[in-house]
Image (cartoon, grey):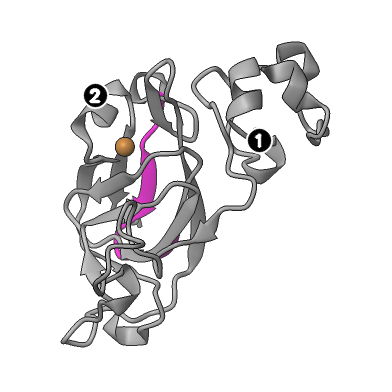
């Protein structure tokens, strides 16, 4: 299978010595699209061209013959409590290997992660989730609401869980307003149990 498919593929950026044949036939795994992600066995695919899919119906709802609401249809009734522009941005990849049942953020399951994801209390950060897998992942952050960046300005919809479609991205702005350590995980609990979870740590500034 792999041999027949290899001819037309862009081999640049791949580690030929450690080439993973399942990744070859599942799709591209070009590390240039995810430089922060170690390309171990738990990373079967890297989306070659991840795109914001918040304007698209969910999986299986494209041709149902009736109107389907999408994330971009949502807007908050009240003005957002914090409409500041974010002071920094981060990208988190949702990674997995369906054949080995491995799920993680940035290619590292929870038990391999040494440090929490740090935030300073009160800071506002733009976070983009990039789904490099072929499954949906509803990503949930405890202790906070965040505002989806879907074109509604200071009336952005506020969520604590957002589904990221396969090959899709979701961007949200987060005000880290709850000091403490918070679970941040896929809400498909069997993905969470496999390791698609990390700890978000919000700490006050030390004077
Ligand atoms: Cu998941």
Q: Nearer the viewer, mark 1 or mark 2?
A: 1
Location of residue 150 (image quadrant)? bottom left
Q: Which residue sits at x=66%, y=45%?
A: 33
Q: Residue at x 23, y 70 (%)?
A: 158
Please give the range of residues in magenta. 113-128
SS for dot 2 = helix
Q: Is residue 200 left or right of residue 79?
A: right
Q: Is residue 206 visible?
A: no
Q: Quadrant of the N terminus?
A: top right
| Quarter holding residue 47 | top right
Residue labelled with disc 2: 193
Q: Which mark is residue 28?
A: 1
Earlier residue among tags 1 and 2:
1
What kind of element bears circle 1? loop
The quadrant in which the C terminus is found is bottom left
For the point 20% across and 46% down, the residue is 180
Using the image, determine if residue 95 lies above or below residue 195: below
Q: Residue at x 22, y 80 (%)?
A: 81
Residue 134 image offset from top left, x and y in percent: 45, 39
């Amino acid at each position: 299978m792999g041999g027949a498919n290899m001819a037309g593929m862009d081999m640049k950026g791949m580690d030929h010595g450690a080439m993973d044949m399942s990744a070859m036939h599942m799709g591209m795994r070009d590390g240039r699209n995810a430089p922060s992600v170690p390309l171990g066995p738990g990373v079967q695919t890297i989306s070659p061209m991840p795109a914001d899919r918040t304007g698209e119906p969910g999986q299986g709802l494209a041709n149902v013959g009736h109107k389907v609401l999408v994330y971009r249809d949502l807007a908050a009734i009240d003005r957002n409590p914090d409409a500041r522009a974010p002071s920094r941005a981060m990208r988190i990849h949702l990674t997995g290997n369906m054949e080995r049942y491995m799920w993680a953020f940035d290619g590292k399951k929870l038990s391999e992660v040494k440090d929490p994801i740090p935030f300073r209390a009160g800071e506002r950060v733009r976070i983009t989730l990039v789904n490099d897998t072929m499954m949906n992942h509803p990503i949930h952050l405890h202790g906070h609401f965040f505002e989806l960046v879907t074109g509604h300005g200071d009336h952005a919809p506020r969520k604590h869980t957002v589904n990221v479609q396969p090959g899709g991205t979701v961007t949200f702005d987060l005000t880290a307003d709850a000091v403490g350590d918070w679970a941040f995980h896929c809400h498909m609990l069997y993905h969470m149990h496999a390791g698609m979870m990390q700890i978000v740590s919000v700490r006050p500034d030390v004077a």
